[in-house]
């Protein structure tokens, strides 16, 4: 690892002496200037690696050549006018000073070692679990090691896209911060940091190192609360639907929604579509009174919640009963309309004395009560709201058959070969069977449907209505009148006279029209008139 402190330097006393000594370079007899060279000049070496430095003096009679440095050194090789030194464990930037004697004068030369080292690692600081869309976010890249820092920079990447580039400071580890504004499309996107050690100006390469990618999770949560939909009044022991939804979520598929009735969590079916999340459940309660329904939606680090009250009630009844559902005519029948506590009942418009008590009606069953419908209305007040329920029941009265004399005439006069209907009806419970038979035979005439009346239909018919409750009879006289031949001849004569009158009238009309137009047709003269002329 590269040292974080300043590099070691040569002793200041030696530097001052040498700098004073090198103020004037030695010259030869003819004014020639001699130089001391250091090779390599200003080298760039990897951290911790050894380096061989050669100091050479172009002097005809060179003296002792030495190397001043704070690094560990050893003589590598030497010759006339040159000396090589091996530096071990070069771990920091360093200035080298080569010195030599020429013509009893001191000659010096400087070289600067630059040490480079790759960062041990580069990391993207931990991201928040969830980041709201559109809010500014600071992303930090941490760089451990690396030199020289003046050639070291760090790049923030979104996938392969470069979002920013900054130089790396001297602190260890170095922290470089970038500010971004995440978008919806950045959800699930990988972010990373890349360090770049650019030594191309030193004749080397561009060295890069990239951190492990980290996914960013973005979200958007509306300010509005979830929308709860449910019946405000619940009947106990009855299942009711509950619906909760929230729009404007992103990503809606990763949001969580919960429904609760009091302390009871509801087993909800959750569906996400586009930016909407919906939960649907059925619930029932066994506790009467005010209860609370809660819906909460969680996404990222934010939560939205809605709490609303429902009113659970017990509405027993109403029940509507008959003491005899199929009563025989003349039998007493009791009708009872009843309900639970606090419920006000009303039977056929007549209320019970007080809530919680039944309403009753007593009657003696008659034919008119058959198929009579009774109505029971029950009301219950819950938190100022009146709830209604209704029941109905039909009474059947068993009575014997009766033929309706008003609709079944006792004497009928019909013409032969004409269509007629025998309009006879019978009532009763159970429904009676009605048939009309001619007395003295089994000939049956249709009842209630059209039929062709024939001359031999004349006679007396016995109409009988029968059921399991008894029988009713009545006689119907049918008089069928045949057609009269004299009457037919008179009618034909009248028609013939009417035809002649019509023809004569038409002839007179034609003659009158021709006269109006002065059109005459003369007969030719007779032969005798021709002879006289």
Image (cartoon, rainbow, N blue to C red):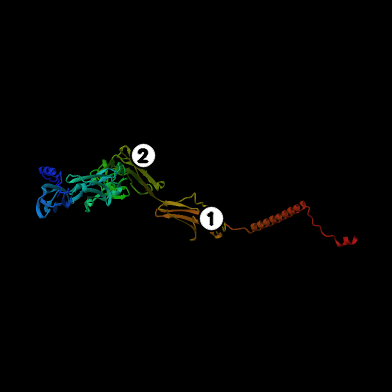
To which residue does mark 1 refer? 420
Residue 297 seen in render: no
Q: Quadrant of residue 340?
A: top left
To which residue does mark 2 refer? 350
Q: Quadrant of residue 490?
A: bottom right
Front in this rendered view, residue 279 or 400 = 279
Count of numbered circles on the image:
2
User: Disc 2 vs disc 1: which is toward the camera?
Assistant: 2
Residue 449 seen in render: yes
| 309 to 462, vertically: above or below | above
Q: What secondary structure is found at the residue carrying circle 1?
A: strand
* Mark 2 and mark 1: Cα distance apart in space: 50 Å
Task: Name the spot of residue 479 as percent of width and height, x first.
Answer: 55, 55
Q: Residues within 10 Å of mark 1 (few under 14, many from 20)?
A: some
Task: Name the spot of residue 439 as percent of width and height, x first.
Answer: 49, 58
Residue 262 numbered tag: none
Q: Residues within 10 Å of mark 2 (few under 14, many from 20)?
A: few
Q: What secondary structure is found at the residue carrying circle 2?
A: strand
Front in this rendered view, residue 302 or 485 = 302
What's the residue at 51%, 52% (across, down)? 410
**Horizontally, is 378 left or right of 213 in the view?**
right
Front in this rendered view, residue 438 or 156 = 156
**Horizontally, is 11 left or right of 326 in the view?**
left
Task: Name the spot of residue 480 as percent of width and height, x first.
Answer: 56, 57
């Amino acid at each position: 690892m590269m040292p974080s402190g300043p590099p070691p330097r040569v002793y200041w006393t030696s530097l001052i002496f040498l700098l004073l000594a090198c103020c004037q370079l030695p010259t030869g007899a003819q004014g020639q200037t001699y130089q001391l060279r250091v090779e390599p000049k200003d080298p760039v070496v990897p951290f911790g690696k050894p380096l061989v430095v050669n100091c050479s003096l172009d002097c005809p009679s060179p003296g002792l050549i030495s190397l001043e440095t704070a690094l560990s050194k050893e003589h590598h090789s030497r010759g006339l006018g040159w000396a090589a030194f091996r530096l071990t464990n070069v771990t920091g930037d360093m200035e080298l000073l080569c010195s030599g004697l020429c013509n009893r004068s001191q000659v010096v030369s400087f070289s600067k070692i630059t040490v480079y080292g790759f960062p041990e690692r580069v990391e993207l600081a931990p991201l928040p679990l969830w980041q709201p869309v559109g809010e500014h976010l600071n992303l930090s890249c941490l760089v451990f090691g690396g030199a020289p820092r003046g050639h070291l920079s760090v790049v923030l990447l979104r996938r392969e896209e470069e979002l920013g580039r900054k130089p790396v400071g001297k602190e260890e580890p170095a922290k470089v911060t970038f500010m971004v504004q995440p978008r919806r499309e950045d959800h699930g996107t990988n972010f990373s940091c890349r360090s770049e050690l650019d030594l191309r100006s030193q004749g080397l390469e561009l060295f890069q190192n990239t951190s492990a990618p980290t996914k960013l999770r973005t979200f958007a949560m509306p300010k509005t609360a979830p929308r709860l939909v449910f019946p405000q009044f619940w009947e106990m022991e009855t299942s009711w639907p509950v619906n909760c939804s929230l729009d404007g979520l992103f990503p809606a598929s990763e949001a969580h929604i919960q429904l609760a009735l009091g302390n009871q969590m509801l087993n909800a079916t959750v569906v996400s579509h586009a930016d909407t999340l919906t939960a649907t459940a059925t619930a029932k309660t066994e506790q009467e009174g005010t209860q609370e329904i809660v819906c909460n939606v969680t996404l990222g680090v934010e939560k939205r919640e809605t709490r609303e009250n429902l009113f659970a009630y017990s509405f027993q009844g109403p029940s509507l009963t008959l003491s005899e559902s199929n009563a025989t005519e003349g039998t007493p029948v009791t009708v009872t309309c009843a309900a639970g506590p606090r419920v006000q009942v009303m039977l056929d418009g007549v209320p019970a004395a007080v809530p919680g008590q039944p309403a009753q009606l007593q009657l003696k069953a008659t034919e008119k009560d058959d198929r009579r419908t009774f109505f029971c209305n029950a009301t219950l007040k819950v938190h100022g709201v009146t709830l209604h329920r209704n029941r109905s029941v039909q009474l059947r009265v068993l009575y014997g058959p009766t033929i309706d004399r008003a609709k079944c005439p006792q004497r009928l006069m019909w013409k032969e070969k004409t269509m007629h209907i025998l309009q006879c009806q019978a009532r009763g419970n159970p429904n009676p069977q009605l048939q009309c038979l001619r007395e003295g035979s089994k000939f049956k005439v249709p009842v209630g449907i059209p039929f062709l009346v024939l001359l031999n239909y004349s006679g007396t018919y016995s109409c009988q209505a029968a059921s399991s409750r008894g029988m009713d009879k009545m006689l119907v006289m049918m008089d069928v009148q045949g057609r009269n031949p004299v009457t037919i001849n008179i009618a034909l004569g009248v028609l013939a006279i009417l035809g002649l009158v019509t023809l004569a009238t038409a002839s007179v009309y034609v003659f009158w029209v021709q006269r109006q137009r002065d059109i005459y047709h003369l007969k030719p003269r007779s032969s005798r008139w021709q002879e006289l002329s």
